Amino acid sequence: MHIRFSHAASALLLSSTLVLSGTAAAQGAQARVQGTVKDGKGQPLEGVQITITTLSSARFKDLRTTDKSGKWATILNNAVWKYTYKFEKPGYFPFQEEKKIPIGTVETFDVTLYTQEQAVAAGKAEIKKDPFVEAYNGAVEEFQAGQYPEALAKAEEATKLGPDKSNGWALAAKMASPLKDWDKAITYAEKALALDPDATDLYPLLLTAYREKGDKVKAAEYEKKFASANPDDPDILYNQAVELYNKNDFKGAAPILAKAIEAKPDYAKAHFLLGMSYVNLNKIPEMKKHLQEYLKLDPKGADAAVAKEMLDAFK
């Protein structure tokens, strides 16, 4: 049985206040990576700096240092992404490698760093700098320093040095985005996807870019692709629930919102909408629980007045 309140009908339907939540990068399952760094003589190396970055998030940087036993470890909160690991210590040749750690695993990543003398003795060729890697890393550094035009220029340099490397094009797209250069963001992201169809982390960027360009057809295409690639993403679930709620399908919206909250317990908007769904399903204790949680999480939120009105009506 649906409960209706004429004085709050517009609030119940939320036709004017409910909007689809912006898509967010999917949060993948965790993984752990650990290892030992030794020198060319097989001795543990203390004080090696490990810099972990990822193309999927230019703002991400994790710094680790080896202990007296040469050991290091970290937890990857999103093991969906590939990460680049750079090992450095003064007096030794640096080592860098990109790796994808399987979700839910503990991966051992051991590395050997050589001094020039050790490299010669071991028959290792002198490590030469890769111009593409230098340009790529330079772009990331400029971005992290807030120098967005310089970051884009470096990323574009990387695409010229490695036109067949999807990560270079993807980086250029992500550098163009904060500058709101949507034409470049779209062009570079589409090239990256053409080279690597599995680069699904570019879907939100393309969705935003096409929306800003006013291309509703392409925006809808990438919104659908993102939802398909990330069915358990809280924002995707919330958006699905909004559509059902605005069709008065409160019974259908409620379990989807519960799932979104399970994935993201502090999702204030989801708590509010679930509370409003429950009031229409005549589940008053559940309604109170979620509206109270909404007010706790966002006491000055856009729907705070409606939440208080509903709670007051069922004291």
Image: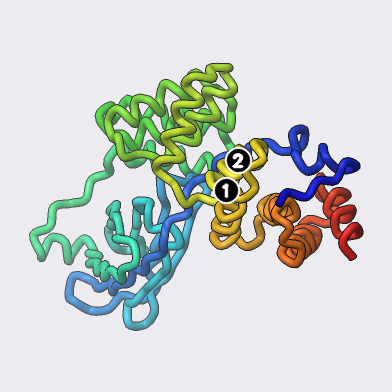
Q: In front here: 30 or 57?
A: 30
The residue that label 1 is drawn on is 252
Q: Is there CB contact under 8 Å for labels 1 and 2?
A: yes
| Side of 237 relative to 300 (left or right) | left
| Direction from residue 93 to residue 231 in the image, left or right | right
Residue 314, x across and y down, in percent? 87, 61
For the point 41% across and 69% down, which residue is it? 74
Quadrant assignment, res 111: bottom left
Q: Which residue is mark 2?
A: 244
Q: Residue at x 50, y 50 (%)?
A: 233
Label whose residue precedes the other's in the sequence (1 or 2): 2
**Position of 184 compared to 241: left or right?**
left
Residue at the (42%, 70%) spot, across then down = 65
Left/right placement of residue 284 relative to residue 19 reads: right
Where in the figure is residue 210, as x and y percent of width and height?
52, 22
The amino acid on which the numbered mark 1 sits, given as a three-letter code, is Gly
Q: By what rule are the colours in the image chosen?
A: rainbow
Task: Give the answer, above or below, for where 277 lies relative to 195.
Answer: below
